[in-house]
Image: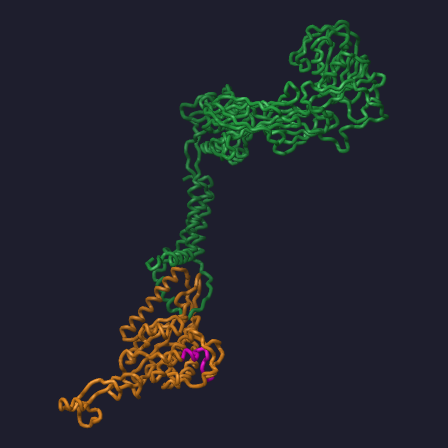
Amino acid sequence: MTEGLPGPLTDAPTPSPTGDRPAAAGTRQAFLPSEVDPTVFDEAFLRQLERLLLLMRAPVRGGLKGGRRSVKRGQSVEFADYRDYTLGDDLRQLDWNVYARLERLFVKLFVEEEDVTVTLLVDASASMAAGSPSKLLFAKRAAAALGYIGLASEDRVAVTALAGRTARRRNSLRGSGRVFRLLADLSAITPADGRTDLLVAARHAAAQLHGRGVVILLSDLLDPSADRVVRELAATGSELIVMHILSPDELDPVLEGDLRLVDSETGEGIDVTVDLSTIDAYKARLAAWKAGFADLAAKRGASYVDLSSDVNLADLMFAELRRRRVLG
Amino acid sequence: MPFITPLALAGLVFVPAVIAMYMLKLRRDQAVVPSTLLWSRLLTDVEANAPWQRLRRSPLLLLQLLLVIALVLLAARPFLERPAGLARDIVLVMDTSASMAATDVAPNRLAAARAAAIDALGDLPTGGRVSVIAVDRSARIVVNDTSDLSRVRQALDELQPAASRGDLGDALELASKLAARSGDAQILIATDAALATVPTTKVDAPIKVLPVGRERKNQAIVALAVRTSPSAVTRSVFISVANLDIESAQRRIEVWGDDRLLEARDLALDAQAKSDVVIDDVPADVAVVEVRLVGRDPAAEGAADQLAIDDRAWAVLPPTQTRLVLLVGEGDPYLETALSYLPNVELYGVAPADYGPASQRTDGRPWDLTIFESNLPSTLPTTPILAIAPPRTSALGVVTGTLKDPGIGSLSPDEPVLRYVDLSTTHISQAQQLTTPDWARTVIPGPKGAPLLYTGVRAGLPTAVLAFEPRRSDLPLQVAFPILLSNLTGELLGGSAAPTDAVAPGTPVNLTIPSGATGVTVTRPDGTTLDLVASAAGGASVSYVATGLPGIYTVTPIRPAGASPNPSASGGRSPDPTPLASARPSGSAGAPAVPIDPDAPVRFAVDLFDVGESNIAPGSVAAIEGLGAAPDPSGSPGNGAPTDRPTTRDELWLPIVLLVLVGLCVEWALYHRDAVVRMRRSLVARFGRQPGGTT
C-alpha cells in the first residue's frame, strides 16, 4: 500500500531508526504540506503504519463498500450461507450445483465488505498541554497513526477536538491519499484556554456521530465526569477505544515539600505536604482511578489503554496496541 | 524527683512554643500541575480525619516536645540521693613512684590508680572536699581542699610516674596533717603497695587503699660502675642485674659506649637472684657508657618485662685532665715530691722573688692552684690558694704569733679532707698561730682554738691555709702526708664540677660554677635545658634539683658576653715557670692527659638503682590500712560523728542525654525517612531480586 503515499519521496530525509520523530526535528520534509506539523510524522513511520490494520472486534454495519467485513451479505468472495430463492433474486447468485443435486433453488450468500467511520476524539483541554513530553502532542501523533491506519484500511476517518464545551468535528476522510489532510486536521488542534467540560464536549461529539463505527478517545480523563464520558460514548453503539494518556510527571510525581499545587485549567490551588507517604498515597489513588476506568470500559465493551506520554510511538503502535488486540 | 537547679524548669515554656510553630501556616512554594483532581481527592482522604490523623502523623512534633522536655530536665539536673561511701574530707594520696609505671595493667598502674581514684570519688558526699597528694621521692600537695572534682580530675591527669622510689611515710605524715583539719576525714591511697620500706607513721584518720597491680615480672639493672683496671690500661664495666620475678628469665645486656654498641651478652637470670656482669676493654675514648637490658629476642613484640625504667642505666667516665699547680717557695723536697705524685697534676715552681705578673702562663691558661710556701705576695692571685705557714696577716687569715710544739686537737671523723688520714702520730715543732676566718672551717684544730689547717671559699675561690711547714713536722715521713695533700688539693682544685657517682632520681646535685662563669646550663636527657645562675655574685656553686629523669645530664658554663674563659695576663710576659714535675695519675687509662677546658661540658648520670622500687610485686594493702584509725563500727566512712552520716547525689544526666540522643536520631530518621525508604527500595530493587527468582 505504499503506493498510496502521495508526493515525491526522493528528497525525504533519512528517518530515525525508531521512526518516532524526523531525523531533524523541526525541518520540514519535502512531501509534507505546509499545514502539517512536521514533528508529527515522518515517511518511514507512515510506511510502517501501512502494514497495520485496525482489528475490529465484531463486524459493523457501514455505508460504502470497504475492506472491512460487514454484518450484511454482499458481493465479496467469502461464502457466508445459503437461503431459499425468492422471486426477484439475482439469478447469478443461484447455486446450480445444489440445484442439480437437490432440485431446489438456493441462493449463495457472501460476506459483505463495507467501510466504517473511525472517529478520533482528541481531548484538547488545557491539562493535555502539560507534561513532558506534552500529552496533547502524544495524543495527536497517536491519533495520526491510528487515523492513517484507518485510511489505509479504506475506512472513513474523522478527527474531533474536544475543547471547552464543544466538539469540533472535521470532515471525514477516506483513502490513504487523504493522509496529509488528516495530519493537517490534527496539526490544527491547539490546547484550549480555560476550563474544559469534557462531558459536555463528548456529548456534543456523540451527537455528531453518523452510525456505528469506531470511536477512539485520546484524553487524560482529568475531569470529574470522565467516567460518564466513557459511559455515554460507549452507549453510542460505536466501538469505543479509550486511550488514557498521562505524563510521567503525573504517573510518578517528583514533587517534595510543602507546596501549593495550582490547577493548570482552573487556576485553583490546594495546599499539600508532599512526602514519600503522600506520593505513595497518590500512586495508590492513581492506580485505583485507572483501574476504575478499566473496569468501566470492560463493562461497557470498550477497550481501555493507559499510556504514558513518553512511550515510544512505534512501540505503542507495533507492540502495545497489538498486544491489547486493538491493532491486528 | 529533686532538682539541683529547679529554676531551669521554667524552660518548659518552650513546649507551647513548639506547638505554636506547628500551628503556624507554612509559606508554601507554588507548583503548577495539569490537574489537582487526584491531589484534591487525596487531600480529602487526609482531611477526613484531620485532628487525629494529624496527631498520629506528626511524630516530629511529639519528638520535638520530648526533646524540649528532656533538655529542660537536663538543665534542671535531677538527682537521686544515697548514703555516701566516703567521708566529707578526702585526702587522696597518689603513688607516683617508679613502680607505678609498671604495665601489668594497661596502660600502666598510675593510669589504673587514677581511674580507681576517680571512680572512688564518685562516693564523695555532697559538698565533700578533696585534697590530692602526689608522692614519689617526697610528698607534695597538688590539689588542696577543693570541692571541684573537675579540678581534681585535671590534677590527676597531669600526674606522671616518677623515676624515683616513693616515700609513703612522708605522704602519710602530710595526709595526717591535712586530715586533722577536718572532723570527718578519710585518706585514700591509690598505690600498688610495692614499697621498699613499709611506713610506720600512724594517722588518726581511716585509710582506704585503692590497690592496683597484680604481677611482678621485672628484671632490673641495679648497679653500674666503670673502673680502671689495675694495669691502668683498660677500663671495665661492672653491671649487676636482678631478677625480681618468681620465675627465671632470659634477658640480654647491651653495653653502649657513646652510642656505639660495645658488647651484647645473653643472661639467664634465676628467680629472685642477682647476676653480675663484667665487660672489659672499654675503649679509652668512651665518655658515656649506657647499659640496656633488652629481651633475648629483639624481634619479639612487647616489653620483655613490666617496668622499663630500670632497664637502662648510664655511667659517666670523667676525662683525664691535667691541673696546673704553681708552687711559690724556696723549695721543699717533701712537698714537691708529694705534689708531683698527685694524679693529673703538672707542677711548676717559682721563687718568691720571681713571683709576680711575669709568672702568668704565656698560653693564657690560669693556674688551677697556687701554693705559697712560707710567703705571701702583696696581691693575692685570683686562683685557688693553698698558703703554707703564712708569714703575715693577710686576707687569708690573721697571724697572731707562733706556736711551739702545738698539739693536734680533736679531729672530726666526717671531715672529707681528713679522709683516710691518720694524724695520731704526727708531731709539729712549729706553726703559725692563726685565727679561723669567717669564710673557713677548721680542719685540723690546734691548741687554744688556733687552727692548724682550715679551708673554705673566700670570695668565690677555694682557699686553704696550713699553719705549719711540713718540713717542720714529721708529717712528710708518714703515709698520711700524701693522702692529706691529695685530699686538700682535691678540694681546692674542685675535681669535677659534677658528681662522679650515679645520682638517684630526684636527688639535688651541687654543681660548681667555673671561675668567670655566671652560671651553668643543664641539658636534661630529654633535651630540655635550664639555665642556673648563682644566687649571689661570685657564688661558686648552684643546686640543681630537677633530676627526676634518668639519663645523662650535661652541664655547660654560662659566660658573660665578651668574657673569655682564659683571661690573658696583663703586663709583660716572662718565660713559663719551671715545670717541677709532670705526673700522671697512677690509675689513668694510659690516655694522654688533656688540659682542662673550663667551658667543656660536664656530665653526670641519674640512675634508679633501687632494688626496692624495681620490685613491683604488689604489697600488703592491710599493712597500709592498718596505719590508719579503725573504721567506725556505725558505718560512717570518716572519723566524724556517726549521726551525721553524709549523703551523695547521683545526677541522672546520663539517661536523659541518651534519651536526647536517641530522640535526635529518630527525628533525623523521620525527617529523612523518604530518603531512607528510597534507598531501601533501591537496594531491594538492586539486590533483592535473585536471577530468575522472586524478591
How many badges with numbers are in the image? 0
Q: Is residue B369 visible?
A: no
Residue A233 location (% of width, % of height): 31, 78
The part of the image, by quadrant, that contains residue B434 is: top right
Residue B497 location (% of width, % of height): 68, 24
Q: Which chain is green?
A: B
From what the image shows, is residue B456 above or below residue B127? above
Q: Is residue B66 visible?
A: yes
Q: Give the dominant element type of the magenta stretch: helix, strand or loop.
A: loop
In which quadrant is the N terminus of chain A drawn?
A: bottom left
Residue beneath the point at 42% across and 23% down: B632
In the image, farthest residue toward the bottom:
A88
In this rendered view, identify the residue nearer to me: B458 or A324: A324
In this rendered view, identify the residue nearer to me: A170 or B90: A170
Which stretch appears magenta? A33-46
In this rendered view, identify the residue nearer to me: B420 or B149: B420
Q: Which chain is orange?
A: A
Residue A224 location (% of width, % of height): 35, 72
Q: Is residue B506 left or right of residue A247?
A: right
Residue B575 location (% of width, % of height): 84, 23
From what the image shows, is residue B551 above or below residue B338? below
From what the image shows, is residue A66 above or below residue B454? below
Residue beneath the point at 55% across and 30% down: B142
Query: Does the stretch in magenta take in B132?
Result: no
In the image, farthest residue toward the left:
A102
In which quadrant is the C terminus of chain A drawn?
A: bottom left
Q: Is residue B48 left or right of residue B406?
A: left
In the image, farthest residue toward the top:
B405
In this rendered view, identify the residue nearer to me: A264 or A64: A64
Q: How is the image coloured?
A: by chain
The part of the image, by quadrant, that contains residue A247 is: bottom left
